[in-house]
Image (cartoon, rainbow, N blue to C red):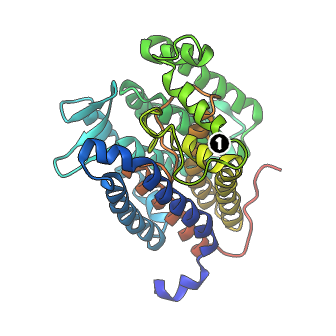
Amino acid sequence: MLKQHWHKVDWTLMIPVSLLIIIGIVMLISTSSIVGFSNYNDAYFFIKRHLVSLGIGLGACFIGIITPHTLYKRFLGLLFAIVVVCLILTLTPLGVKVGGAQRWLDIGLFRFQPVEMLKFVLIVFIAVGLDRSQAYLNNFLKGCLPLLLVAALPLGLVILQPDLGNTAIILMVIGCLFFLSPMPLKHIAVLGSLCLTAICFIILSHSYQMQRVLAFLNPWDDPLGKNYHIIQSLIAIGSGGFWGLGLGESKLKYFYLPLQYSDFIFSIICEEGGFIFALVVVLLFTLILVKTYHIVKKTDSAFSFFLGMGCGLLICVQAIINIAVVIGLLPVTGLPLTFISFGGTSLITSLFYVGVILNISNDYEQKSYSIRS
């Protein structure tokens, strides 16, 4: 039955996704070989693992395509319970602490970040909530606040890890979905104020996060210490100029710029490819978001619309935050660049989101869901 409808899938979404994946492979070969050879005596250590994650991610994308997206709504309660349990387990001895944050769960065969599961489950929850409570969205207490209160439980567990970067992604995506819904703007402003207040409290209660904010506000105070990452990133970006130094010609990747194959890979993109190559990357992410909107706008289901837009926003908002950090517009968050950076969990889940969007394109009727004008 599924084979009869493959022709309905909007495969054009895969064009910018595939181009970003190819750029990621090329840049990982350029940036990670020196680290792989130095630390593991294997210049292809990171790229081989990245290709394994890519293979798993393509499988996850296929699962997203063939699985009816309405099933996520049917099993939302079970999915929500599983992800909450996984988040709780990260705070136990099963959790793995890396870089001061206990975000990973070790189950023997592999490690993964439950927060990546949480992102999708919360998008499903918000999509269901906005679909079922459209008649109550004008009432703050009945339509708006309950959605945020339920989402606050797993988000509170993420904050305890602590993981402010992914918390910001989730809140920004939820805010965008609220804006696209018929929810009054004054209610969105109130919810936004509450979230901003909570984020400020979190930063003030964690000294290392406060230090990151202070380093962001005064990037030249400690150039060899806490501000080393961002200063080296800005040097790499400035070195690239308009046209770049050329593929493989980066100087900063030789142990001057930390995490040049992961969180700060966009810096090397700017150094080797210049402003032009960086602009291409930004435009490809923009095209993903525009194409996602074009796909989900054709559905007559509010749930499908918000689920698809949520998946597209999860991909692009993370990229926006990563780029903003690299160019010095936000404090360091530790988030990879979607589809490009080395990082298995992010790549796998992002490709799954693409599969979900493609499933929606396969399923819609030729109608249009009405959103805020």
Q: Amino acid at mark 1?
A: Gly
Instruction: Give the percent coordinates (x, y) of residue 345.
Output: 38, 50
Instruction: Give the percent coordinates (x, y) of residue 267.
Output: 57, 40
Nearer the observer, 27 or 142: 27
Q: Which residue is the site of mark 1?
A: 240
Instruction: Say if 342 sits above or below 89 in the image.
Output: below
Nearer the observer, 112 or 133: 112
Instruction: Give the percent coordinates (x, y) of residue 147.
Output: 55, 38
Residue lying at 69% horizontally and 33% vertically, measured from the top left: 188
Q: Is residue 37 left or right of residue 300?
A: left
Residue lying at 49% horizontally and 59% vertically, measured from the top left: 26
Label 1 residue SS: helix
Residue lying at 58% horizontally and 36% vertically, measured from the top left: 236
Q: Is residue 235 visible?
A: yes
Residue lying at 51% horizontally and 39% vertically, measured from the top left: 264
Instruction: Say if 211 sits above or below 258 in the image.
Output: above
Instruction: Say if 133 sits above or below 53 in the image.
Output: above
